[in-house]
Amino acid sequence: MQHFLSLLDWPAEELRRLIDEAVFLKREYQTGGNRPALQGKSLGMVFQKPSLRTRVSFEMAMQHVGGYALYIGPQEIGLGKRESIADVARVLGGYVQGIMARVFDHEHVIQLAEWSPVSVINGLSDYNHPCQAMADVLTMQEEFGQLQGLNLTYIGDGNNVTRSLLFAAAKFGFRLTLCAPEGYRLDDESIQKAKAAGGVDVYRLVEDPTEAVRDADVIYTDTWTSMGQEEEAEKRRKVFPPYQVNYQLMTHAPKHAIVMHCLPAHRGEEITDPVADGPQSRLFPQAANRLHAQKSILVRLLGR
């Protein structure tokens, strides 16, 4: 049984084929609609935390290719509390042809995959966010026509999205430059895994934001405080202001550089309105690409 839990689990060639298929499915949808490749197939969507993009993009993706998506909120299941994860996986697997789970603890999605008789897709965990990274790669591919040799500079908190971008860099041949305050950077284990998969040049740490963006093709940021970290919010607001993506920082970046953000954005914190809404912003094409990147994953896993 094949799952989609981390980009590191997939060979680079297969991930590139998924991006090619996403390009095809997007074009097909825009020129008359997608073929019903998943007609009669259902996706169970397990949510421990709320989301605009994850829920709507997966639900619409299934609808576009003829399938059906069922939303299951935390009240219905309570993974590992009301019912064991192993039992949830086996029960759900008897009803649907695929499971997407958006969870706090990455171990929960691993256990779902271990016990599920159907494919499991990681819709986000505290460890990584592979579906977001695939949408980001699709956006970069559309913008630059290639991925090899690009430099993505990430400014801010080294979180699950950052880790997924690092793994994407290892698989697709670009470099992740991280600019984050001490204590909020990526762990050595993730960096070493990425280097083993993509080479030693796949990752670079630059402490000064101005220097970090000088050779950036993509400037990426995310909220300073993710869901589940609310008790740290005040502390983080004191640490991260020097890492804001604003107009002044953008004056040091190449003119061709684009700005990305996985959303939701806390405008006025990690990113300012003039940048988020400016000519270099790709925030909303990037968000729209969640639909098409995930459609490719769904057709691959559920359509066999």
Image: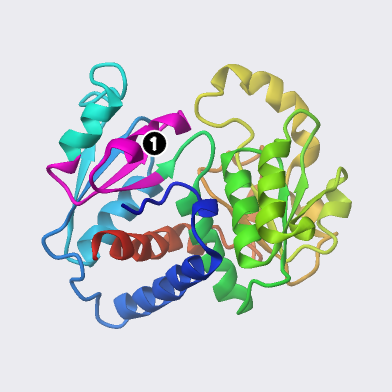
User: Which residues make up the magenta segment?
Assistant: 93-122
Which sits in the foreground, 2 or 158?
2
Q: Quadrant of residue 250?
A: bottom right
Task: Work out whether residue 249 can be spotted.
Answer: yes
Q: Position of residue 304 (x, y in %)?
A: 24, 65
Q: Amino acid at mark 1?
A: Val
| Residue 227 on image: x %, y % | 50, 29
- Rendered location of residue 263, percent (x, y): 52, 46
- Per the image, the residue denoted by label 1 is 109
Q: Where 17 falls versus 235 (above or below)?
A: below
Task: Based on the picture, tell me whether residue 98 belongs to the magenta stretch.
Answer: yes
In the foreground, 171 or 256: 171
Q: What residue is shown at x 19% (from left), y 52% (from top)? A: 97
Q: Residue at x 58, y 16 (%)?
A: 231
- Colour scheme: rainbow
Q: Residue at x 71, y 41 (%)?
A: 156
Compared across the picture, whether 66 is left or right of 270 comes to left
Furthest-bottom residue in this view: 31
